[in-house]
């Protein structure tokens, strides 16, 4: 099954071009294993071509002459086109990485809003007027675009990640070379074509598809980049840090998570149970900030875990194109094998599954990569399934007795992306919010996002922020200007 023409090409300097090596690879529908399209296998030479195009666009031609108002209108046009083609993009994401269609439709709505937010920021970039000690001196600061940016994105939200990387680039006046995940390249390629339709000049937004060890590694190390943004695993993030040292390019990293979700007995337990299911199993657990360590006050632990398992067991699992589907497949056979390996390890070290626990097969699931939402009890903090990011629908429930204890246990991880707290006590909400080491803490809710609110990690979960004004500000460098008025 083919999803459209041109997908076997890269998009560089405003044109579809073949990969320099002439090779392609298949992208597969994880719901049934069928081939969707063949994708160009870009390598280091293609990255060189794309970076050169981005550099020309940044320094020459029309783009440097775009005013903040021009960039704002460009973003607004892109938002309108994305809104126009919302169904196409939702279906591309669903077919390639499995997320249910009603979820991908909702994502497109949020991304249109995000582009409009970035459009507003484009007109509100400000410097400062400073007061030197010498009254004859005038000093001010101005913000200038950092330059040519690279971005490497994951497969769990290809359109989402593409818009998150592109929006601040267009708002700031930078240029971009994007390397999508090999498992999910369709929506990023289509977005690049939409950007050209919106009026983005050639070379401002380039997409090089291919494998991380080839195109991704070449982009991370490329001396022609001024900044690189990466979303993905901690291991790959560390490799990108090492690769970026050659020219000391600026870094933004949104890495893995093993987020705690903490439930006290005084919380609204019905709401907390429903939210715990969404926190752990949305997108089949393939979410960086998934709340996969569920700490529950001991007095209610067993009953609460069983309620979460009952809610999870009612979720409808199937092909994401079915509007009734709650959970789709995992993205690939490789990811399914990873999840099954963690499941086997958890069971062999003493945990018990009270829902799910094994791959789904049979008439409804066929050759798809389906794994059900799985709730573990009798888990321990030292188990791999509790310590390591699985990126699949496995939730470990863990009892606790006291505030100080649960804060210490929740923080006993290399990660620090998100955390949830459920309580009826305002004082406890404040204490936990300040005590938890995470970039975002949600109280009596989970995984809420908004274009205006920054998001990111601490510790091994990354550096820099996405969303909010800070996201765009990271694409500027500050220049100080001095004028001696006595001359």
Image: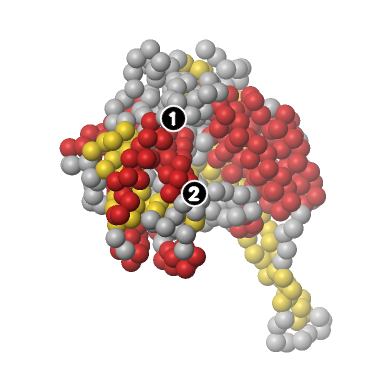
Q: Mark 2 packing: few (<14 Cα in 10 Å), some, or many (20+)?
A: many
Q: Pointer 1: what residue?
A: 315
The colouring scheme, among rainbow, by chain, secondary structure or one colour, is secondary structure
Of 266 and 255, the residue lying toward us = 266
Q: Answer left or right for 149 relative to 222.
A: right
Of 425 and 161, the residue lying toward us = 425
Q: Secondary structure at mark 1?
A: loop
The quadrant of the picture occupied by the C terminus is bottom right
Can residue 287 be seen in this snapshot?
Answer: no
Of 102 and 86, the residue lying toward us = 102
Of 151 and 97, the residue lying toward us = 97
Residue farthest to the bottom, as pictured: 134
Measured from the top left, where is residue 163 in percent x and y? Answer: 61, 40
For the point 75% across and 81% down, which residue is it?
A: 137
Measured from the top left, where is residue 428 in percent x and y? Answer: 44, 65
- For marks 2 and 1, the one nearer the N-term is 1
For the point 71% across and 45% down, which residue is it?
A: 116
Q: Secondary structure at mark 2?
A: loop
Residue 17: which quarter of the image?
A: top right
Measured from the top left, where is residue 447 in percent x and y? Answer: 50, 47
Residue 90: which quarter of the image?
A: top right
For the point 38% across and 23% down, which residue is it?
A: 369
Can residue 89 be seen in this snapshot?
Answer: yes
Q: Pointer 2: what residue?
A: 446
Measured from the top left, where is residue 299 in percent x and y? Answer: 30, 54
Q: Which mark is residue 183?
A: none
């Amino acid at each position: 099954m083919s999803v459209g023409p041109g997908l076997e090409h890269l998009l560089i300097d405003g044109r579809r071009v073949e990969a320099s090596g002439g090779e392609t690879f298949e992208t597969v529908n994880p719901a049934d294993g069928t081939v969707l399209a063949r994708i160009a296998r870009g390598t280091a030479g293609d990255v060189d071509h794309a970076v050169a195009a981005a550099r020309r666009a940044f320094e020459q031609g029309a783009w440097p002459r775009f005013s903040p108002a021009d960039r704002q209108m460009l973003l607004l046009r892109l938002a309108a086109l994305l809104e126009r083609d919302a169904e196409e993009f939702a279906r591309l994401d669903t077919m390639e990485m499995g997320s249910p269609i009603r979820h991908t439709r909702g994502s497109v709505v949020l991304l249109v809003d995000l582009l409009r937010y970035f459009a507003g920021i484009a007109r509100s970039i400000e410097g400062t007027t400073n007061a030197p000690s010498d009254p004859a001196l005038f000093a001010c600061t101005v913000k200038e675009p950092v330059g040519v940016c690279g971005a490497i994105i994951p497969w769990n939200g290809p359109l989402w990640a593409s818009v998150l990387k592109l929006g601040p680039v267009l708002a700031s006046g930078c240029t971009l070379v994007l390397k999508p995940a090999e498992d999910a390249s369709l929506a990023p390629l289509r977005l690049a074509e939409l950007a050209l339709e919106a009026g983005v000049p050639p070379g401002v937004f380039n997409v090089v598809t291919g494998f991380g060890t080839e195109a991704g590694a070449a982009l991370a190390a490329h001396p022609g980049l001024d900044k690189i943004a990466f979303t993905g695993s901690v291991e790959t993030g560390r490799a990108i840090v090492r690769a970026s040292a050659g020219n000391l390019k600026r870094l933004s990293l949104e890495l893995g998570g093993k987020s705690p979700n903490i439930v006290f007995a005084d919380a609204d337990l019905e709401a907390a149970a429903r939210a715990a299911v969404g926190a752990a199993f949305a997108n089949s657990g393939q979410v960086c900030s998934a709340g996969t360590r569920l700490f529950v006050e001991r007095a209610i632990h067993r009953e609460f875990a069983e309620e979460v398992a009952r809610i999870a067991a009612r979720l409808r699992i199937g092909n994401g194109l079915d509007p009734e589907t709650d959970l789709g497949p995992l993205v690939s056979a490789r990811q399914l094998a990873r999840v099954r390996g963690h499941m086997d390890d958890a069971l062999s070290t003493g945990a018990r599954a009270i829902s799910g626990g094994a791959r789904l097969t049979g008439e409804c699931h066929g050759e798809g990569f389906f794994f059900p939402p799985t709730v573990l009890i009798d888990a321990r903090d030292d188990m791999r399934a509790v310590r390591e990011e699985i990126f699949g629908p496995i939730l470990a429930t863990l009892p606790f007795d006291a505030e100080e204890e649960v804060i210490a246990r929740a923080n006993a991880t290399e990660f620090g992306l998100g955390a949830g707290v459920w309580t009826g006590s305002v004082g406890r909400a404040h204490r936990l919010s300040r005590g938890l080491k995470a970039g975002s803490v949600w109280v009596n809710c989970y995984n809420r996002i908004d274009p205006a609110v920054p998001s990111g990690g601490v510790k091994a979960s990354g550096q820099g922020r996405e969303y909010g004004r800070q996201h765009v500000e990271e694409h500027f460098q500050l220049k100080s200007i001095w004028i001696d008025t006595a001359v």
